[in-house]
Amino acid sequence: MGWVGAGVLIATTAYLLYCYPPRSWAEPRSFALPGPNSDAPVAAATTDDPVQRKHGSEASTPSIETDDEDSQSTPKAAASSAPPPVLAVPTFSLDSGERETSQPATMPSISQPVNTTEQLSSTDRGHVRKFQPPPQPSLAPPPKPQSSSIPPKATTTGASSLMPPPPVPRPRPTSQASRLTPTSTLQPPRLSGNSLGPPPSAAAAQRGLGAPSSGSRLSNSTLAPTQVSLKKSSSRKVILEPGFSPLDWAALAANPKNKLRGEGLPPGLLRVTPSMLKEQHGRKGRDAWTSYHGKVYNISPYAPYHPGGKGELLRGAGKDSAQLFQEIHPWVNWEGILGECLVGILVSEHDVQTENALDAMD
Ligand code: HEM
């Protein structure tokens, strides 16, 4: 190499001398002077030709030369400009390549407007990428574009899916139906007839015109007031005169001296035949007798105290009243009211005749 360098040196000097002949061309000293002057540039050119070309192309400022000297000694100091491009280049180049081909429009939207112009210019120029990209790719790249582009679509789609107002028409029919149904359901129970019904219904059912009819009327319940009026009208109770209340009757019956069985009767129970009972019809000054479960009672003293009236009570005079009694008020305690009015026992005509025959034989 030394020989080659010397040859080159000589050739160059010869060329220079040929092109720019010195003023003292004729002087022999001129050959000696260029020698030492040419040594310095030749040495610099031979040693640092490739390196100096790079630095010279990059910049002519002295600061760059100092960086080069530092870079040789300490790479970190010079890496301030170099490393970032090394790390950023692969990521950025890949992203930029894909984006340039597939999604050029997403990049500006992702990166902020300040960097958009720089990126567009950087995509066109590869040299500029190395210096500018590091900050840009680190902030911009993958997550933001996808997230920013996808979410609005999803939100819009979700909103559109949720927006259609089916619930608006739904509540209307449901509310109407619910309103109609509950009212309908609530009305039947409200039928106060039920609350009023049970105690009197049981009584009225057995009192008046039959339990089944009253039960159906109560179920209708819309006619509750009419039911009450019917019960009152069906009620055949009479207004008793003063001093003939149930308590007055109880006080009268408590005293055995009142002789509620009737005047002129023997002390013991009588054997009453149907014919005898029939003669005690309550007219023509006779007491009214009636039979109930084989016993004969004098009902004449109770007539003014009978809540259903004297006429109703005398419907059973001279005959058996069990059927009428059961039809009207089976809950009434017959024996408790008319115990002191017991006359005798009901016997058949045949039994009375045999007894009479036996008595005659005696
Ligand atoms: C045998 C024929 C009888 C007839 C036809 C008859 C008829 C009636 C009638 C129509 C009523 C009114 C019912 C109402 O409106 O709630 C009534 C009430 C009454 N009757 Fe008679 N009755 C008879 C015999 C008796 C007898 C023998 C007694 C007593 C042992 C009696 C005691 C009563 C009582 C206590 C009431 C009031 C019932 C109530 O307040 O719920 N009845 N009766």
Image: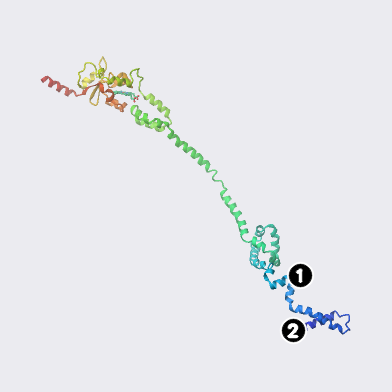
Mark 2 is surrounded, within 10 Å at the Cα level, by few (under 14), some (14 to 19) or many (20 or more) other residues, namely few
Q: Earlier in the sequence, mark 1 or mark 2?
A: 2
Q: Amino acid at mark 1?
A: Pro
User: Residue 70, percent across and down?
Assistant: 71, 71
Q: Is mark 2 within 8 Å of ligand 1?
A: no
Q: Quadrant of residue 63?
A: bottom right
* Front in this rendered view, residue 186 or 127: 127
Q: Position of residue 323 (x, y in %)?
A: 28, 26
In which of the image's four quarters is ligand 1 placed? top left
In the image, which disc is placed on residue 62? 1
What quarter of the picture does the N terminus occupy? bottom right
Q: Please tell me whether residue 135 is drawn above or below residue 221 in the rendered image.
A: below
- Above or below, 243 relative to 112: above
Q: Whole-percent x and y of residue 50? A: 73, 76
Residue 106 point in image, percent of width and height: 65, 59
Q: Residue at x 43, y 35 (%)?
A: 189
User: What mark, if any, has residue 2 been given in the picture?
Assistant: 2
Label 1 neighbour load within 10 Å: few <14, some 14-19, many 20+: few
Q: Nearer the viewer, residue 113 or 308?
A: 113
Q: Amino acid at mark 2?
A: Gly
Please tell me in which quadrant of the rendered image residue 79 appears: bottom right
Front: mark 1 or 2: 1
State if disc 2 and disc 1 touch (CB < 8 Å).
no
Residue 327 found in image quarter: top left
Tell me how far mark 1 sits from mark 2, CA to CA: 30 Å
Q: Secondary structure at mark 2?
A: helix
Q: Is residue 199 left or right of residue 287?
A: right
